[in-house]
Every structure is written in structure tokens, then in C-alpha cells.
């Protein structure tokens, strides 16, 4: 499939979802045997769910935090580091993932718009903590400063994703938008491709299956991120 060569004058925004971490062994959300098969979203990924059963929510995120400690970034994550090194300040990676694998792989220009498993904060005084600094044996870890319950540093449904201003600012200058490993179900992330295209960007999709918002994808590469991305880097970028 012939796509225009991407030059140094382009600004590249990449949006990743759970699919890029699948080859590292982390479950996605909506694939079969995905996370949402064993948990109701309302129970574990909403503020109401946390208020109703904070122990259940902490158990859900602690399990994912511990699993994320045991896995490594894969070829797909490393391919994005290569693109960032080529494009430097003309590159931004926005991830919906909370596993931290992009940062471990070496990505620096990263926005974790749905938060991260590795940190938590106090429900009252907002003090922030790393999970590796707190006693995870406690079912609901308390804040060292004020004693109130800590909560995972995760953007739940109904909450404002992080750093939206920076994301919208970058979207305005994006000339190449690449969506990788995301089903396009969750907003506002699923709308970024529409906004990029409306701003005149070319849009590229890399996904195992056709995503919900595929009508906005100019060039679609069906397959595993870890297999498609290295080829893309070789052929697309000069
Ligand atoms: C907000 C917590 C206001 C973190 C998550 C009706 C219409 C529009 C919007 C709404 C609506 N009703 C409600 C809303 C808002 C709601 C929403 O979008 N709901 C959806 C379900 C309709 N959104 C919100 O509440 C957001 N906040 O709207 O605030 C606002 C509005 C505008 C501007 C500012 C503020 C908050 C959303 C964040 C919710 N938190 N999770 C956690 O526990 O991890 S979302 C959750 O889904 C994860 O964060 C995940 O990242 C995200 C998206 O999932 P994907 O990453 O796409 O994963 P999925 O499994 O779905 O797909 C994986 C894909 O990979 C598949 O396509 C598969 O084929 C592919 N794949 C698999 N293996 C591979 C692969 N691809 C390549 N290679 C492979 N190897
Ligand atoms: Zn506190």
C-alpha cells in the first residue's frame, strides 16, 4: 500500500491502546478473555464503584500493577521509541494504557491520559504515592499525611482524562496521526483521529481487527503491532 513518505517537517501523534501491550502478555479489555469479561466496568473502573467497594477496586488494580511488574515492553513499544528518536519535538505519544511499558521502553514524549498503575493518590488531600512505597498488604492503603483512603491514579469512566490541553494543542499541529492497538470505543481518545483528519492530517491505523472508528483511517495495516510497526518504521519514515 503506497503511503506518502513522512518527512522531517511532519508532526507525528501516536495514540496507543491495550493492543500494543498484548504481545507483552497483558490482557486487553474487549478481546475475548479480556479484562471486561471478568469484571463489570461499573464495579471496578468508575468513581461510584470505588465508593461502593474500595477493596474490590484496589484488588483489581493491585493485581494489574503486580502483573505489569512482571512483563516487559515488546517490539511494538521499541519501534515507537525509534520514531520518537527520529522526530524528537515533532513527535508525541498519547497512550490510553496504564501499564507504564512505553516509559520503560524508553519513550519520553508520552502522555498517559488514563493514568498509571504505578502511582496512587489520597482521596482527601491528593498527596501522591508510588505503589512500591506503600504497604500493599492493606486492603485500602491509608494516606500517611491525613489517614484517609488512597485511590489508584487511574482515570475512571466519567472522569476527566489527564493533560487534555496538551493533547488538543498537539492535535492542532498533527500532520500524521497513527492509532495503534485500540478498538476506538472510548472517548475522548477515540475522537482524536477525527480531529486530526479534520485538521488535514493523514491517518494510519495498526490493529489486529478493524477498530470502531476505522472510517477515519486513511491507511490501515491489519496485524500485530510488534510485526507491523518495525516494517512501518523502515518503509514510511525517511
Ligand atoms: C470523559 C481505566 C468527560 C483505566 C478506562 C457516549 C458517547 C461518547 C462518550 C461517552 C458516552 N458515554 C460515556 C462516555 C464517556 C466515556 C466513554 O467513552 N464510554 C464509552 C465506553 C462509550 N468516557 C469517559 O468517561 C472518559 N471521560 O469522557 O470525561 C470529558 C469528555 C471530553 C473531554 C474531556 C472530558 C474517561 C475514559 C477513561 C476510562 N478509563 N480505563 C484502566 O483500568 O485501564 S478506559 C479503558 O478502555 C482503558 O483505559 C483502555 O485503554 C481504554 C480503551 O480500550 P483499548 O485500549 O482500545 O483496548 P480494547 O481492548 O478495547 O481494544 C484493544 C484493541 O487492540 C482491539 O481492537 C484489538 O483488535 C487490538 N489488538 C489486540 N492485540 C493486538 C492488537 N492490535 C495490535 N497488535 C496486537 N498484538
Ligand atoms: Zn491525605
Image (tube, helix red, strand yellow):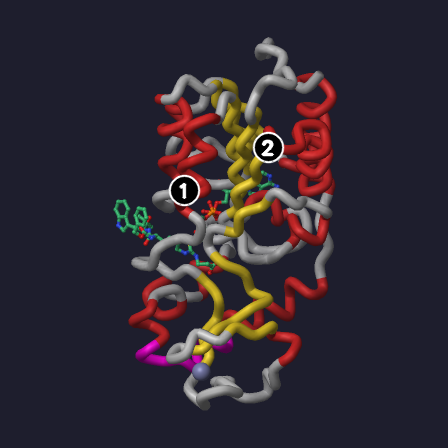
Does the residue tagged 2 have its C-beta within 8 Å of any atom of ligand 1?
no
Q: Is residue 89 left or right of residue 49?
A: right
Label located before the other in sequence (1 or 2):
2
Give the quadrant of ligand 2: bottom left
Which residue: 71% across, 53% down? 104
- Disc 1 residue lies near ligand 1 with CB under 8 A: yes
**In the image, what residue occupies the spot 35% across and 70% down?**
43
Task: Classify mark 2: residues with Cα within 10 Å, few (<14), some (14-19) or many (20+).
Answer: many
**Residue depicted at 50% across the width and 55% down the height:** 34
Q: Tell me where residue 198 sits by quadrant.
A: top left
Q: Position of residue 204 (x, y in %)?
A: 52, 24
Foreground residue among 98 and 110: 110
Q: Which residue is mark 1?
A: 189
- Residue 45 place in picture, x, y as percent: 39, 64
Q: Main secondary structure of the magenta part?
A: helix
Q: Position of residue 30 (x, y in %)?
A: 45, 50
Mark drawn on residue 64: none
Instruction: Please state the horizontal and vertical placement of residue 38, each as a whole percent of the image.
Output: 45, 65
Seen in the picture, residue 14 relative to 18 is either above or below; the reply is above
Instruction: Locate the C terminus by quadrant.
Output: top right
Q: Does residue 56 show up magenta in the picture?
A: yes
Between residues 225 and 233, which one lies in front from this camera angle? 233
Kindly state the secondary structure of the residue where label 2 is placed. strand
Q: Which class describes the residues within 10 Å of circle 1: few (<14), some (14-19), or many (20+)? A: many
51 relative position to 107: left or right = left
User: Label 2, on which residue?
Assistant: 91
- Asked whether 38 falls inside the magenta stretch, the response is no
Read off the magenta span.
51-59
In the displayed structure, 30 sits above or below 134; it is: above
Amino acid at each position: 500500500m503506497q503511503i506518502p513518505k513522512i518527512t522531517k517537517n511532519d508532526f507525528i501523534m501516536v495514540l496507543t491502546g491495550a493492543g500494543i501491550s498484548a504481545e507483552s502478555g497483558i490482557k486487553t479489555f474487549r478481546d475475548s478473555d479480556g479484562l471486561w469479561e471478568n469484571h463489570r466496568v461499573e464495579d471496578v473502573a468508575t468513581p461510584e464503584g470505588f465508593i461502593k467497594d474500595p477493596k474490590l477496586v484496589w484488588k483489581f488494580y493491585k493485581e494489574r500493577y503486580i502483573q505489569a511488574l512482571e512483563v516487559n515492553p515488546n517490539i511494538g513499544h521499541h519501534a515507537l521509541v525509534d520514531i520518537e528518536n527520529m522526530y524528537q519535538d515533532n513527535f508525541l505519544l498519547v497512550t490510553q494504557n496504564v501499564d507504564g511499558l512505553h516509559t520503560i521502553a524508553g519513550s519520553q514524549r508520552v502522555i498517559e491520559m488514563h493514568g498509571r498503575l504505578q502511582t496512587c493518590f489520597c482521596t482527601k488531600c491528593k498527596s501522591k504515592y508510588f505503589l512500591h512505597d506503600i504497604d500493599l498488604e492493606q486492603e485500602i492503603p491509608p494516606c500517611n499525611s491525613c489517614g484517609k483512603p488512597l485511590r489508584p491514579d487511574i482515570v475512571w469512566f466519567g472522569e476527566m482524562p489527564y493533560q487534555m490541553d496538551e493533547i488538543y494543542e498537539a492535535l492542532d499541529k498533527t500532520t500524521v496521526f497513527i492509532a495503534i492497538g485500540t478498538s476506538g470505543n472510548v472517548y475522548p481518545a477515540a475522537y482524536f483521529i477525527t480531529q486530526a483528519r479534520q485538521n488535514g492530517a493523514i491517518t494510519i491505523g495498526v490493529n489486529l481487527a478493524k477498530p470502531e472508528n476505522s472510517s477515519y483511517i486513511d491507511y490501515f495495516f491489519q496485524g500485530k503491532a510488534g510485526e507491523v510497526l518495525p516494517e512501518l518504521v523502515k518503509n514510511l519514515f525517511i
